[in-house]
Amino acid sequence: MDVNVILENIPLYIEGMWVTVQLVVLSLILGLALAVPLALVATSRRRFIAFWPRAYIYFFRGTPLLVQMFMIYHGTAQFDWLKDSALWVVFKEAYWCALIAFALNTAAYTGEMLRGAIAQTPFGEVEAARAYGMSRWTRFRRIILPSACRRALPSYGNEVIFMLHGSALAGVITIVDLFGAAKIVNARHFVPFESFMAAGFFYLCLTLLIVWIFRIAETHWHAYMRPREEEGEEKGSFPARSAPAYAAKGL
């Protein structure tokens, strides 16, 4: 194992990691912005309205991300009207094509997570909001959507990790991300084990960082789900008692 080759190409890996982080973060922001209205419309009781976001979700969840990226990067070049338009400035660049594909893909998965979380909102919360006099939009904004986001947080953490791993496909269309950097190192020095192992190490570090961030977020947003007895034990004000202890007192 030639470690010197990896050490010499650390700057290339750092640049590739920065491109990977850019693609993942931007695609997640755009995907989340698209997923929220998708989830809201998909929960509509009118089938004709709910059909379109569900069809979008079904298409992007049912086809591979690599196929979607090839359709955007290679497929759009066959349309002359697109080449003659101002949009060709975006679609001729591999970076923006990958970003569009990633954003559309993660929007479908995130939208389905939110749709399921919205559908599972406890009926009592909705009824309490109605009794308080909240309008339909206020209920979604202050009750339903925040509650759904809290419950979808663990699943969304997995989606972020899957998006990070899926971003390696960007190296297939000439983008020098982490995977692309490993391909370049392998092509220069013919060390496939060392080059791709180094890329895997960087992916592992990024994954651990994502897990740590979401663990902190879950601890903060799920604090209301902790049993009060445990909080009392930590503060030393309300010591927890076992059931036999209460039974002995006749309670």
Image (spheres, helix red, strand yellow):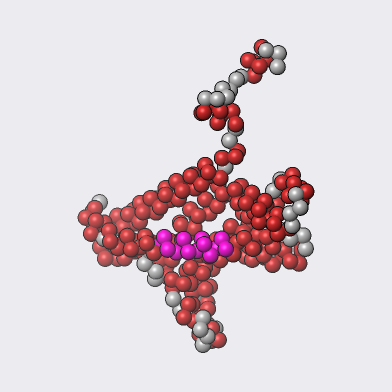
Q: Quadrant of residue 22?
A: bottom left
Q: Is 242 on the left or on the right of 70, as rendered?
A: right
> Residue 89 at x, y = what percent?
46, 80
Q: Closest to the observer: 203 or 226? A: 226
Q: Which residues are magenta?
A: 20-33
> Residue 201 at x, y = what percent?
35, 51
> Residue 248 at x, y = what percent?
66, 12
Relative to 133, does residue 25 appear above or below in the rendering?
below
Q: Closest to the observer: 211 or 64? A: 211
Q: Is 192 on the left or on the right of 107, as rendered?
A: left
27 inside magenta stretch = yes
Relative to 13, does residue 212 appear above or below in the rendering?
above
- Report the residue at 42% width, 49% height from top: 209
Q: Main secondary structure of the magenta part?
A: helix
> Residue 17 at x, y = what percent?
37, 60
Q: Is 117 on the left or on the right of 163, as rendered?
A: right
Outermost residue, top direction? 248
Q: Closest to the observer: 251 or 113? A: 251
Is residue 126 visible to us here? no
The C terminus lies in which quarter of the figure? top right
Q: Quadrant of residue 15?
A: bottom left
